[in-house]
Amino acid sequence: MSLTPRSHVPMFLLILVFILSLTWTTEESSLEKILHNHGLPAGLFPQSVKSFKLDQMGHLEVHFDRPCLAQYETTMFFDTVVKANLSYGQLKILEGMFSEELFLWLPVKDIMVIDPTSGLIVIDIGFAFKFLSLSRFDEPPICRSYLGLSFRMDGRKGIEFEDQRKGYSSFV
């Protein structure tokens, strides 16, 4: 009995099925699972995420239907698109996320979990670091739309936030 080489078609189909299964798994991954796998809490973004993209370089884009507010230990504002670089334990160079500090809306620059055993998450708001309880980020909060909060770009001053419920505006 002689051995004859089989067609390469079955091997090609096997490889194709394997690649498609990897693609389906990636697309079905939730943002919470991706954050968890990168050493970050699952509730870092609110429940109203419409879609997200994560490329192989770690560039993350999170899309919302509309801007909204979420309550952690502080109030956070999420624009319709939030962009960041994702690496283990941190989101760096954030765009589209702001934290309310006293009467100002300040851009969130970075979010880091330096030591998970400390129970703290570090939020860089530019001129200061905020240390918040990591447990507040376990579950995605409800992100409520707020009609009284608006923002606009001003080339001279930056981004203006107007909070009609509190009667003030601030520039970032």
Image (cartoon, rainbow, N blue to C red):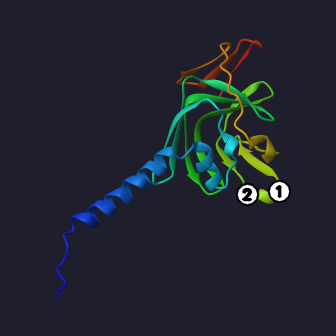
Report if residue 126 is visible in the image.
no
Is 163 situated left or right of 152 in this image?
Answer: right
Task: Give the image location of residue 159, x and y in percent.
Answer: 60, 25
Q: Which mark is residue 10?
A: none
The residues tagged by marks 2 and 1 sit, at their Cα atoms, a distance apart of 8 Å
Q: Quadrant of the N terminus?
A: bottom left
Q: Is residue 148 above or below residue 47?
A: above
Are the residues at dot 2 and dot 1 in contact (C-beta closer than 8 Å)? yes
Q: Which mark is residue 114?
A: 2
Residue 138 seen in the figure = yes
- How many numbered marks have been drawn onto this rendered protein structure? 2
Q: Is residue 11 left or right of residue 118?
A: left
Amino acid type assigned to the residue bearing label 2 in the image: Ile
Judge from the rendering whether residue 19 lies leftward or rightward of residue 124; answer left or right: left
Question: Which residue is at a point 16% across and 86% down the rendered structure image?
Answer: 2
Q: Residues within 10 Å of mark 2 (few under 14, many from 20)?
A: some
Who is closer to the viewer here, 136 or 102? 136
Q: What amino acid type should be assigned to the residue bearing mark 1?
A: Ser
Secondary structure beneath label 1: helix
Residue found 65% across the figure and 19% down from its top: 145
Circle 2: element type:
loop
| Viewport quadrant of the C terminus | top right
Q: Dot 1, crowdedness within 10 Å: few (<14), some or many (≥20)?
A: few
- The one of 3 and 143 positioned closer to us in this rendering: 3
Whole-percent x, y for residue 66 in the image: 57, 22
- Which residue is identified by label 1? 118
Q: Position of residue 4 (x, y in %)?
A: 17, 80
Using the image, determine if residue 168 lies above or below residue 28: above
State which quadrant residue 103 falls in.
Answer: top right
